[in-house]
Image (cartoon, rainbow, N blue to C red):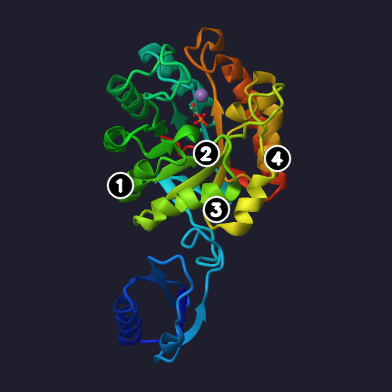
Amino acid sequence: MLVVMHSTATAADIERVCGAITDMGFQPLPMPGAQRTTVGLVGNDRRVDGSHIEALPGVAEIIYVSSPFKQVSREWRSENTLVTIAPGVTFGGTDVPVIAGPCSVENEAQIMAAAQQVRAAGAVALRGGAFKPRSSPYSFQGMGKDGLELLQRAKRETGLAIVTEAMDEEGAQLVAEYADCIQIGARNMQNYSLLKTVGKLKKPVLLKRGMAATVQELLLSAEYILAEGNDQVILCERGVRTWDPSSRNMFDLNAIPAVQKLSHLPIVADPSHGTGVRDRVTPMARAALAAGADGLLVEVHPDPNKALSDGAQSLFPEQFGDLMRELVAIANTIGRRISAVAAR
Ligand code: PEP
Ligand code: MN
């Protein structure tokens, strides 16, 4: 439930509404807006009776949020939420930041080369997993803390923001110390204790859609993070598993406008995991931007044939350079702009 206050409501009126919500056993969440304040009622998933609140001074109207996700919904907040992960790197506005880099951090030379290459091509954030969720326990599991140290060094050298995955609660605390944005991978989209943990951390979160998750389940997972007080959430479409083995996943571009209608949170697209095949990454990256994605996440490796993970879907640096030039042109025609790194 949302209590919309009149633009003339006083601080005392808002205080009184908050008190009434507390008396009902719920938590009030005042949200000052440009014109007027709204007070959200948090902590229930059933319809509550707000008739006595409606009668309080300064109250304009009561809105009952019909969707199962509340704080994530457009009903709760009509304007887009802007998520800034580093100065000049904001998701959800006109600008479209591109996050690029290898699937995994493998060694110093590899991540430094990747960082320089993606920066030269125009990316504003570097990706690279230090903790890798692999289907097989015998596959490369990531460099762990050493990988985070390397990412930090790459950031110092290039100025790129860092996006990297956390797989568990302990890892999340560590990743938060090094990264500008904590990635929650597809396999962990419904790891509710991890979602609560990152909800308590004051860091932006990139939440990837689960392999078989519906759009509603993705938004409910985001709700876990917002419910803990962190509204800095970027959603990510990365394809869903289907019966068809011709692609690693079915890249669901339909989810982009669907999510934007249902939620105020930004949504980025990951055509690398969405297709799993290098030659399909460029066409689907173009399509994702055209479909309205608020950002892109692309795997790029200095030498994809030697990659320790996801080499088959990683672009060669030159291919990424070509893609970036095309993205700039597409963005221009749809009234958006590919974010650029401020000159250093
Ligand atoms: C990744 O980004 O490298 C990754 C593991 O992605 P996902 O969780 O979408 O499979
Ligand atoms: Mn990967």
User: Mark 3 belongs to which amino acid?
Assistant: Gly
Assess whether mark 2 and mark 4 are in contact (beta carbons under 8 angstroms). no
> Of label 1 and label 4, which has the lower sequence position?
1
Mark 4–mark 2 Cα distance, whole angstroms, equals 15 Å
Q: Which residue occupies 32% across, 83% down?
A: 11
Residue 173 shown left or right of residue 78 in the figure: left
Q: Mark 2 = which residue?
A: 340
Nearer to us: label 3 or label 2: 3
Residue 106 drawn at (x, y percent): 40, 14
Nearer to us: label 1 or label 2: 1
Ligand 1 near label 2 (Cβ, under 8 Å)?
no
- The residue nearer to you, when weighing 212 against 322, is 212
User: Mark 1 belongs to which amino acid?
Assistant: Leu
- Tell me the crowding category of disc 2: few under 14, some 14 to 19, or many 20 or more residues within 10 angstroms, Cα based: some
Assess whether mark 4 and mark 1 are in contact (beta carbons under 8 angstroms). no
- Tell me the crowding category of disc 4: few under 14, some 14 to 19, or many 20 or more residues within 10 angstroms, Cα based: some
Q: Which residue occupies 35% across, 25% down?
A: 151
Q: Mark 4 = which residue?
A: 330
Q: Mark 3 = which residue?
A: 93
User: Mark 2 belongs to which amino acid?
Assistant: Ala
Q: Which residue occupies 34% across, 48% down?
A: 196
- Examine the rendering and report whether any part of residue 66 can be seen: yes
Residue 280 drawn at (x, y percent): 69, 24
